[in-house]
Structures are given as C-alpha cells and as structure tokens.
Amino acid sequence: MFTSLNQSAAEKMLQTLRVAGNPFRNHFARNPDDETCAKYHVPELYSRERNILLGIVDRHRYANGQPSEVVPILGNKGAGKTHLLHSIKHGREGTWQLLVTPGTFHRDTDFLEYLFFQLIETLLGGARQGNARPLDFVGENLIRLKLIAALGKMGQKERQSLFPRGPFLGWLKMFGYSTSQSRERTEWLLEQLTRLGNLPYNQGALRKLCEQSGLGADAVVRILENHSERTEGKSPSALMRRALVCGFAKAVLQGNENDLAEFLTNGFAELNIQIRPGRQDLVLALLKVLMEMFRTLCIPVVVAFDQLEDLLLARRNDETHRTAEAFFAGIVHAMHQVEGLTFLIFAERGLWNRFLPSIDGYIQDRLNQPLHVPGHGTIHALRLEAPPVELVQRMVEARLRAIHASLIDARELSPIYPYTMEQVGRIARTEPTLRDMIQQFRRLFDLTVFGAECSDSYETIHKVETLLSRTLAKESRQSPEEAEVETDLKGQEVSNLEGSESETAGDIAEEANLAVDPVTGYSDPASPGPLVQSQLGSYLGLMGGETLPSHADLWDQEVRTARRRLEPEGAVTGATRELQAGLGHFLRLAMDHGVKVGPWRLQHVVDEWNFGEHPTYGVLSIAHWTCRGGNPWRVGIGLFLGRGQGKLKDLTTKLSVFDIEPSVLDHLILLRPEDDPTLAGKSKQLWQDMEQKGRHCRLELVGLEEFSALFATPRFVSGLFESLPSGQIVPNQADLIQDRCESLLKQLCMPVQGG
C-alpha cells in the first residue's frame, strides 16, 4: 500500500514539476541585490566565512580609531562570492552596516573622490540594505542622538517654550503646574528617545514619537539647528557637521531630501572658509567628517568590490594592468587617509594571482597584511571552497521547497525528489563550484522530468514541444478550459512568471510555428493549442541556462533596479558622478557596437574627463560624432543636475569648459531633469552670454527612465560578461540599444537633420 501511495505521489510530483519548470535556471547571482539570493538562501552555506567577515566588520563598530583594513575573498568563478556578499548586505538581524557596492570603477578619477561619491550614492539612493534604506537608518539614529543632547542641555525656560501655550496657562502658573508639565513632557520624550535606541529599527518611529510629545517636525529641526550653532565651532569640519545634522533632520522629519543632497554634492565646496582648499582636500575633509559621524553611531562602513574581474576588465583592452594598478594603489591610499573603512575584494583566484605579483611591492604588503579575528585566529585571505555533500543537499532542497509545498502528497517523497542522494553526492564530489553543480542539477532535472536534456537554443524547441504534448495527452483528457483551471491551481505557487519572460517564450513559440491540438495535445498545424503553448512558455521561461534571461531581459531588469534606486527625491542629485560614469559607459557601448543615429556614428569616446576645481560638477564625457566621412564634431556631454544654490554653480562650471585652451569641444550638451527645465536670473543671463559668444550648446530634458538607463549601463555590461562562457565574445547589442534607448541616443548626438 505504501509503495502504491509513493508511486501516486511521484506521478503527481512529476506533473507538478513539468508545469512549474526548472528551478535551477538561476544558477548564479548577477549582483548582491539579486532576489535569487534571498529566494534560495541556505544560511549554513559559507557560514564560517560569513562570521569571519562580520567579525572584522564588528571590530570597526565598537572600536574608535581602528585603521582601515582590506580582506580578499577568493574563489573560482561561480563559487558563490556574490551570494556571500548578499547575505552580509541583507541578512543578520540586529546589526546593520553601511555597505557600499560599487558597480563601476572610475580609473581616471582621484580614488578618494570616487570612493566619496560611491558612498553618497549609496546613502541617498532608494535601494534598501536589509530592512532599511541607508538615509533613513543613518538619519533617524543621528537625529535621535542629537535631539537627546539638545534637550539634555536645555534650561527650564527653553523647555517651557517647546510646547504650545494653552488657554488656562495663567491659572496653571498660579498653582505651579505649567513648569511641572513642561518638565514631565521633556523627561518623557528623553526617556522614550533613549528607549528607542534599544529597540529594533522601525522606519518613521522617531517622527511619530516627536509628534506624540507635541513637538512637530519643524520645531525639532529648529531645536537641532540652534543646538548645532551653539555647540559647533567655526572650523570647516564643524561647519560640515552642522550642515549634515540640519540636512538629515529635514530629510527624516520633513521628508525634504534635496537640502542634504545639495550639500553633499555642492554645498560642502561652497562653505565660507578663509583659506580655500583644493578639490581633493575638500572631498577628504567631508569624507572624514562622515566617517566620524558613522563611528559615533556605531555604524561600520564596508566597501565591497564584487566581481573584480568585470570591474577592472570591462573594457577588455591593453590597459588592464594600468587599471588594476590604479585600483589597488587607490585602496592603499584611502586606507592611509581614512580610518575605519573595511574593504572587501571578491575576486577570482586566477585574476588575483595574475594582478598581485605585477604591482608595487609596497601595495602588495598592504593588501596581504594579516588580520586577527577573535575566535578565528589570523587570516590573510578567505578562500571559498566547494561545499560538502550535506550543504549541497540543503541547497537542492531550497530550490525545490516551493514546488514540494504546493503538493500535499509530496510529504511522502524525499525533499530532494526528483533527485536521489546518490546523484546529489556524485555531483557534489565531482563539480568544482556551486555554479557548476547547479548547472548539472539543471541538466539532470531536464533528463529526469522531461526525458531529455533541453538546451537553450531555438533548434530544440520543437523537441520540447513534442515531449510536452505527449506527456499532457497521456496524463489528461480534459477540455482546454478544465485543463487550464487545473494548471493555474497547480502552478500558482511555483510559476510566478514575469510578463517579459512569458512574452519572450510566446514569441519563440510563435516563430517556431508551434501548434497543438487542444484536446489530444499532439501537434496539429491547423490548431493553436493554447494549453500546451502555455506549458511550453512556462518551461522555456523557467528552465534557463547561461543565456536566460535574454540580453533584453537583463537590460530591463537592470533598468528596473536602477529606477528603484533613483526614485527618492535627492537620489538623482546624489548619484551625479555615478550617472556621469554610466553616461561614459553608454557612449562607449554604443561606439563599440556600431550604433548609428541617423547619419551619425561615434568615432571616439572619452568616458570621463575631469576639469576645474569643483569635485562634483567638473566632469564631462566627450563623444566624437562623425557624419558621412566628414570631420568629427567633438561633443561634450554632461549632467546639469544642480538645484537651488547649486544650479548656478553647476552651469558656471560646465560652461567654463569653453575657456580651456586649446579647445577640446565643438559642441556642449547638458542633460537637465525634466521637472526643473527653466533657467532664470543669473543662470539665464549666463546662458544668453554664452549664445552671444557663438558657443554651440543645448539643453536636453531627461526623465527618470533615461537616467535609469544611464545608471544601469555599467551593470548591464558587467552582467553580459558574467553570463557568457569564458572566452566567448559579447554578441552585438546595437539593435537592443537602439530599441530601448532611441530617444536618449538622439539627445546625446548632433542633430539628426544636420546630416
């Protein structure tokens, strides 16, 4: 009887697996924010390495003056480095660290400037780390401590003035109740603020607490401004601290993030300082003030460079060694200049062993400096080895758990069904990395569930369709409507296909002229066969391999991620330098893949060119557009994102490029956010003066979609290299770029009608 039940459960599970598709399609994480990591996370996997890294981070949490440190994490491609980084960034309840994960490296930018703007983009962006957005977490903790200090130093008269006067104030004064009430409310607020620091983070709790006490957001901001003015001095560092406190207070309590974003990108360079420092000195000063603020809050700052091979080899040219040398020298320089930073470098062993011996010996010594970690001893580097069989089994269970949970009878089966322990053990002992193991499980799933290994090429689609047709015809003789209902019920817990994936599968099926009889399930050129095509679409969308999702899907995924990061009010301003780097990558990608805009083609691109003394606004990308064999136009393209007081400074800095001799530009294009298109006052006059001098310049209004495309481009390029087998050339992406970014290309080019 038990055997019969088992057979019945196995048959039902196989049918469910066929509908659900291959759960091993996502065999690697493209970035540390990839949802695949959280969906299939196995806490025990690399737990020792994770604890070591968190132990190093915690040393900076509780010790002031701790020197900056670097930790290499080495493993073969596909060893699980990105997944490990994800678990540090989004896991571990109870503690929080600010994790900066750069997606680009700006070789020709001063490393401290590069590091500073990566930190600012992370702080102001909309991406969450664990359960919190960085700006909210840092801001609420900072304002809570500053408010405790401000209230604690207030005299009795000041405390009385905090709360609005009631109609019976005169009577209360006669009996001595007014003073007592103000004191009690202040003491209650101080007690609650202190208690709030011991509770798990809850976004908005600080603002609600202030409102409950009778203090509105505007009143708290004024309290903090007055306290900072009284307690801080007049030094540049003190002025920066005051501006940061006020900026965070407005962002957290009033929802106004623009002031903080404006200060971090321009205001710090406009402070009233008698002796004017250079741009690098200004950046270093603000970076140190920020690090001091983080230490006060017991928030470690971790800079994690993931997929170093893509970060440094993105251009794949002869200057790779120069890029690597600038990168490692910059890290060592930053370690000497700034205390309390933890650098995590996730790299392939081969790449690490290739680069390290070729750089300066002094840099090598600093990168190889041993670290003592309490409870783990002294380490030089972490090496990720292939996991043992027990952990591989848990990884398989995690991938299959959702499918097993959708079927009641699955409790009678092994949690690794349709695999056996012998198969799991063989793959675990013979494959070198997690990625290789998952690829083998993907192939074995196809063989076991569908009876044949199914590649990702279009040539095998007809075979898959035939196999699915016969399977469905054998297992079900229902009407199409009944079968679709059953399919929905069985697949609702496991399919969860995104629209783009199902559309792609549908296009493939349509191109292959797949048609199936709706009742029998067998091929019939005259019948559309919606049920089987639906099954086929699910299978093709989920079975996956090295090339799924398609490049178009990868582009759309990165753009969606970028949009989430850029949606908050001050995020675009805070990402100024990262967007400029993305613009340079976008232009180079268009040039390398032969993108044409009307009669114009790109002949040469300078990704980033720094000029002047302003650390944020003094940068452009330069594109040489040529038309029908004529002389190229040297076009400078920059981001004009300054707001408020920074608007005039941004425009002045950008237009000063025309004063450089010898001339480097023939035409200047400035990209302006579409929600702030007008020039007024001095900015308008400056623009008119430029036009009177005969300068070729124009403003282009850009929306969030275009900014997201620029931000996503470096990560898209990195994902392309990561998804391809070693040595394979990236396919031409001209059609994809022109399809997804046609309007943006026209904005970055000379006028099309000029050809």
Image: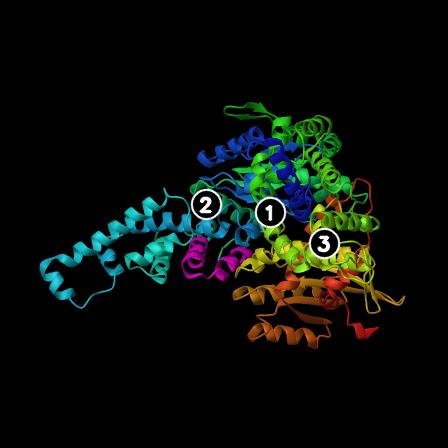
Image quadrant assignment for residue 509: bottom right
> Which tag is nearer the camera, tag 1 or tag 3?
3
Disc 1 on helix, strand or loop?
helix
Label pair 1/3, CB-CB below 8 angstroms: no
- Specify few, some or many for label 3: CA neighbours under 10 Å numbering under 14, 14-19, or 20 or more: many
Which label was assigned to residue 260?
none
Q: Is residue 549 above or below residue 42?
A: below
Kind of residue at disc 2? Met
Residue 733, percent from left and from top: 79, 56
Residue denoted by label 2: 293
Residue 470, percent from left and from top: 77, 48
Residue denoted by label 1: 35
> Which tag is nearer the camera, tag 3 or tag 2?
3
Query: Which region is colored magenta?
Result: 242-270
Residue denoted by label 3: 537
Residue furthest out toward the left: 175
* Residue closer to the observer: 2 or 612: 2
